[in-house]
Image (cartoon, grey):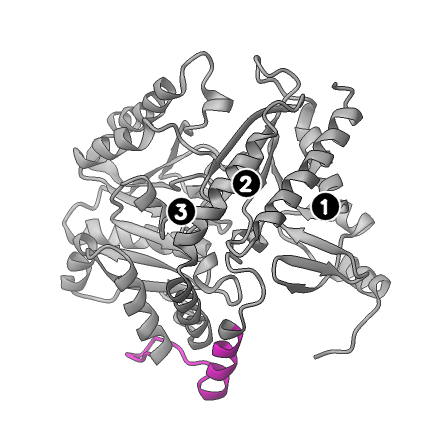
Amino acid sequence: MTAKLDTQTLRNLDQAHHLHPFTDFKDYAAHGGKIISRAEHIYLYDSDGNKIQDAMSGLWCCNLGYDQDSIKQAVFDQLQELPYYNNFFRCSNQPAVELASKLCELTPERFQHVFFTNSGSEANDTQIKLVHRYFDLLGKPNKKHIISRNNAYHGSTIAASSLGGMKSMHEQTMGLNYVHHIEQPHWYECGGDMSEAEFGLHAAQALADKIDELGEENIAAFIAEPVQGAGGVIIPPDSYWPAVKKILEERDILFIADEVICGFGRTGNWFGFETYDIEPDLVTFAKAVTNGFMPLGGCLVADKVSNVLLNGAGDFAHGLTYSGHPASCAAGLATMAVYEDTGIIESSARDLAPHFNAQLQSLVDHPIVGQVRSKGLFAAVELTDDKAARTRIAPDSAAAVYCRDVAIEDGLMVRQTGDAMIMAPPFVTERHEIDNLVAKLTVALDKTARQFGIS
């Protein structure tokens, strides 16, 4: 390890040389940020020793918290034996082989093949190439277009951000012209006077309408998160997914389930598509597959697609230097072992998630809370200055940004998306720590109400 540097030296170097993701570079160069120096259980510690409860599981990935010695040891051991070799040139390695097999074992029987990447962004780039290759081999070269949703997040490479529906990303980069976006199933934001059930059907119909507009013969796939995570924990109305499932069953269009955030237990099942009883043809995974300890992502490919790919002549012209990296796959295997051996996905869904939801519901009557929504172990709290009209407190999400900042200063790491406070606590969080999370969030909401003159 390098010698420890004091906080001010680290901050100065960070501001002078480090360009951070999704950050206002000018602002950061002027004001800087926290230096996170260590972590244990569900707590982060900055370089000044301040303790922060992590209510975001890192970045939706450390579902098992930070004290998983078996995962760390698996990475260490693998680095001693085979620190790296690629999967090109008809080569493979044991951790990649075993993890591919394990992931196929943990998913429905129709998934028997895996393509490894380093991240969810790369995995969604790969999905585009897989679906295009699939339809080319079927003699349907016109099927290139992909439908996604507004406010979806599918990664930050040019291809993945094109798939996503984040306005700020589209404004800064010219994306792919064959990706099209439809309305998101976000009743609170978009539902107007419709009931949630009515709006769910309305949002699903937007998919059918877009297919009719573009022509089914031109569309390769629909991509969606079971629950839109980075978009603000958008939990669709109960009427939405059954209607979407029916639309897709009636058409020759592949369905890509982006499980980067929902996958590995976040919704209460191993995968979000199981929670909503939907049947994807391809699944994107990353983040919690290694508990965030090593970079790894990938695509699960159902037999419907893989059978065509396996029978097609010629190379699949796509690959990554670190695809199937042995140390990352070792971390994935160790993570799967923890999930399976402890039964933590099932026990947290049974015990912790209901407590989390019940405690959050205590915020419904807070003067600036418009809606509380949760599914499994993630949730959003919408801020408003008028509960009936669902209007926003201040322009540019200023109230939610303020609420986030005061929560972090008080020792609670939460995230702001739009005008919502969002959270995804680790599965190893204890009930009293959920209580502490809600108590600290309540304090932040109180401070925000005072700051913006709402009582």
Which tag is nearer the camera, tag 3 or tag 1? 3
Q: Position of residue 292 (x, y in %)?
A: 52, 62
Q: Which amino acid lies under the numbered mark 3 shown in the image of this protein?
A: Gly
- Residue highlighted by disc 2: 169
C-alpha separation, residue under disc 3 versus residue under disc 1: 27 Å
Secondary structure of residue under mark 2: helix
Q: Is residue 275 above or below residue 34?
A: above
Please give the residue where the numbered disc 1 appears in the rendered image: 408
Magenta residues, start to end: 72-93
Give the mark, 2 or 1, whose residue is nearer the N terminus: 2
Where does the image place residue 185, in percent across and percent down from the top left?
41, 28
Q: Left or right: 229 with respect to 304?
A: right
Q: Residues within 10 Å of mark 2 (few under 14, many from 20)?
A: some
Question: Which percent across, then down, holds residue 45?
Answer: 72, 60
Instruction: Decide whether residue 76 is among the magenta residues.
Output: yes
Tag nearer the camera, 2 or 1: 1
Q: How many marks?
A: 3
Q: Is residue 360 left or right of residue 34?
A: left
Which badge, 3 or 1, is on the more N-terminal residue?
Answer: 3
